[in-house]
Amino acid sequence: MRVILSSNPYRDRGLRAALEAQRILERSGVETAVCLPFAPKKGDKLDLPRSLKLCRIEEELDRADLMVCFGGDGTILHTARDATLRDVPILGVNMGSVGFMAELERGELSLLSRLAVGDYRIEERMMLQVSIFRGDKLTMEDLALNDAVISKGSIARVAELEVRADGVLAAGLTGDGVIIASPTGSTAYSMSAGGPIVEATSHNIIVTPVCAHQLGARPMVLAPERVLTVQLPRGSRKHLNLAIDGGKAIRVTSGERVEIRRASHTTKLVRLTDRSFYQIINQKLGGLQG
């Protein structure tokens, strides 16, 4: 078995957690490779062990059986797409504040020894396929594990947009924008904007307006086979911004539309504990009741 240890150096100072995990796994006969999930910011001085050989994550993913991510949910989201496309399961170790997708806390690294004997299970999470079209021409396509956020441009005071399901108008919204989330993403930005909490292993598409200027604007939970289209009203001269899993904003103009559907790929998360979804909500989010 070969395991990638992908550690966020801004969260895992000195890569101490990753190195401890490496010792635990290698004592159990597991081959490991330590990688950074992204290139550090230019000019940042990181506390990295001088003797440690860092591997390139792009190369290691092609021959890995599993990846352990050290950081917060953002670290998992950053690596989810590439790991998913190579069918590599991910196990998250929380080094942040919430870490809702993480399976282990920093003090539970000893449980990693179970990987060597196959004492774990895989939980599949629905993803979203996000595309931008100009007419019939596909100009951009990506995968989202959490959400796609379509929001107002930098100049516009409000966003005016149409949300269609299978070509039928589902909502005409005026406000800050709309969040199209997967069940995994229901406990992220969507929840903060008033959206429903949906069990992470469900198959649904969640539509949550952001600061809508209409009393009748409400979140919606749609069937997974729906194809959503988000665009500006006809004749609008404004533009929208699209952010996928919290990434860099992509400009969407009046001649373009964003299509979101259930992806054929699923993210595979490794489970070592028996914590239920409701236990995680109580632990991470303070419970369903105030």
Image (cartoon, rainbow, N blue to C red):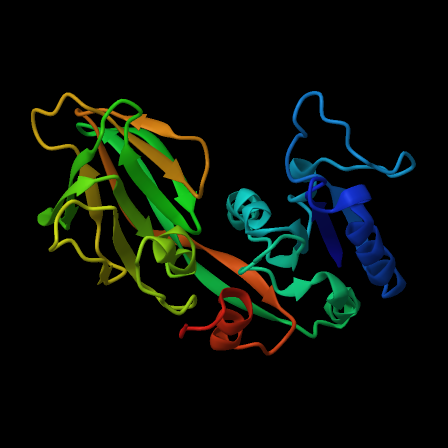
Q: Position of residue 74 (x, y in %)?
A: 55, 46
Query: Residue 287, percent across and down?
Result: 46, 73
Question: Measuring 68% from the left and 37% from the top, which residue is drawn there?
Answer: 59
Quadrant for residue 3, please give it.
Answer: bottom right
Give the total number of marks visible in the rendering.
0
Residue at image location 73% in from the left, 41% down from the top: 35
Query: Quarter holding the C terminus?
Result: bottom left
Pick out the residue farthest to the right: 51
Q: Is residue 160 left or right of residue 67?
A: left
On screen, 53 above or below 170?
Answer: above
Task: Determine the residue positioned at 59% across, 46% down.
Answer: 75
Image quarter in which the N terminus is found: bottom right
Q: Is residue 245 left or right of residue 283?
A: left
Give the quadrant of residue 54.
Answer: top right
| Horizontal side, residue 166 vs residue 225: left or right | left
In the image, 111 versus 278, the foreground residue is 278
Q: Position of residue 232 (x, y in %)?
A: 16, 32
Q: Position of residue 154 (x, y in %)?
A: 31, 24
Which residue is at the front of the view, 181 or 4? 181
Classify residue 230 by image quadrant.
top left
Q: Residue at x 34, y 65 (%)?
A: 203
Closer to us: 199 or 59: 199
Residue 101 shown left or right of residue 30 in the figure: left
Q: Is residue 9 above or below residue 115?
A: above
Depicted 94 relative to depicted 156: above or below: below
